[in-house]
Amino acid sequence: MRVRALFFASYREWAGTDALELRLGEGATVADAVTLVRRRPGLERIPESAVVAVNEEYAPSETALRDGDEVAFIPPVSGG
Amino acid sequence: MRVRALFFASYREWAGTDALELRLGEGATVADAVTLVRRRPGLERIPESAVVAVNEEYAPSETALRDGDEVAFIPPVSGG
Amino acid sequence: MTYVAIVDRPIDPAALVRRVGGEGDGAVVLFLGTVRSRNEGRTVTAIEYEAYRSMAERVLCEIALDACRSYIVSDVAIEHRVGRLAVGDVSVAIAVAAPHRDDAYRASRVVIDRLKREAPIWKKEEYAEGEATWLSGVTPAATGTSAGTSATAQGTDGPGD
Amino acid sequence: MTYVAIVDRPIDPAALVRRVGGEGDGAVVLFLGTVRSRNEGRTVTAIEYEAYRSMAERVLCEIALDACRSYIVSDVAIEHRVGRLAVGDVSVAIAVAAPHRDDAYRASRVVIDRLKREAPIWKKEEYAEGEATWLSGVTPAATGTSAGTSATAQGTDGPGD
């Protein structure tokens, strides 16, 4: 399946882009997406415990992904 | 001595005026001013324990008055 | 900065906010008290506010300065309107600016709570049936100087708002 | 009424206040977050705010609706600005209207505390020396649905404001 990875703030700068397409096997989880992304040069700085939102909702690492999901990597937030 | 009594809100309506001049003996206190005012028709409704401000500061009943003081009778407040 | 005023014209909340805050401030809290259409089960059509103006400004000033002493607050601005107000009109506005929001919220809350207990201001509600009555209100504490000089009391929420 | 928006233009606090409140409301609390000139000992010249806009609006909406469920609140309106802000600019505004002030204050406080912990928004501070850095920030809790659905946490006051 394919999911769309989104990067923001420091993660976006490390990625050099605000979005990437990821190819994952069936049954892949949020944890698998994090592992895949961390193999990309620069993105090894993203922690394994990175917070991820799937389709705009915060999702724990065991969350199963589906084809077409939007998987956002969320650095520690600092709004307000 | 003479002091100026001020009335507000319900007390003003009971007094039919917003100010009266009171004549008091030397050494008179806030309590004496309250007693004097309560003799006036309509103003017996002011409680003996009425809150009074002398020269714009809340003053306990034993406060000694001086000639020329402004003695305000303060109904329970309801601002805001 | 401290600004207090009893005014007999409509309160402009934006103008009050513009009075407070500077480069070192990260938070502004504005409180507005407005005239409600219902109070204690009755339909209110208007409220007449009356104040002992000079003393009210003196009390508000003291409350504002106490808030600046109790919290890390840069500016406090307070306006209370008097005269006849319609439902929805702003009767009181309090703007507080502070470096951090916790102080701004706490100071704002203490100022409105003390204002309601201590400021010599009264309201007479007019009801749909034509009657009008002075609200029962709170008896200020007659301490030696002015009532309640501590800024610790958080107050309970009276029926007023 | 609930209104939330991520905006890339200056926030107009008065316009936000006008969005909230009705005949039954006696209190409006407006919170403004503003850009401070100093943070953690450094001189800040500007802040660049970035948001995951669609998700940020979703999270703010949820926070606003939770506040309406936890407190007796009529309206919540929230705007957060993104882009480059100067010192003194308003970054976030929250307006809450309620029948009574206690609910308005509490709801306002919970909304800003949760916004800071949960909304996918980031700021990069630019300093007088020319450097710029993303603030360290708060790690949102990754619960099953969205982070922290309870409105009970009062939060501590971070360095942000």
Image (cartoon, coloured by chain):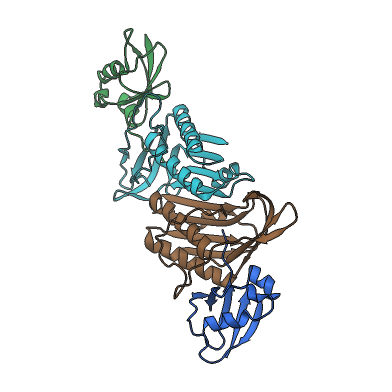
Chain colours: A green, B blue, C brown, D cyan
* Residue C121 position by quadrant: bottom right
Residue D110 image offset from top left, x and y in percent: 43, 41
Residue at point 56%, 75% (across, down): B48
Quarter of the rendering occupied by the N terminus of chain C:
bottom left
Q: Is residue C14 visible?
A: no
* Residue toward you, B11 or D52: B11
* Residue toward you, D129 or B41: B41
Residue B28 image offset from top left, x and y in percent: 53, 87
- Judged left or right of residue C90, residue A24 is left
Residue C9 image offset from top left, x and y in percent: 65, 60
Q: Residue furthest right?
A: C130
Q: Is residue C11 above or below residue D71?
A: below
Residue B22 image offset from top left, x and y in percent: 62, 85
Q: Is residue C68 visible?
A: yes
Residue at point 40%, 38% (across, down): D114
Q: In the rendered picture of this protein, how many numbered marks are placed on residues?
A: 0
Residue at point 62%, 80% (across, down): B37
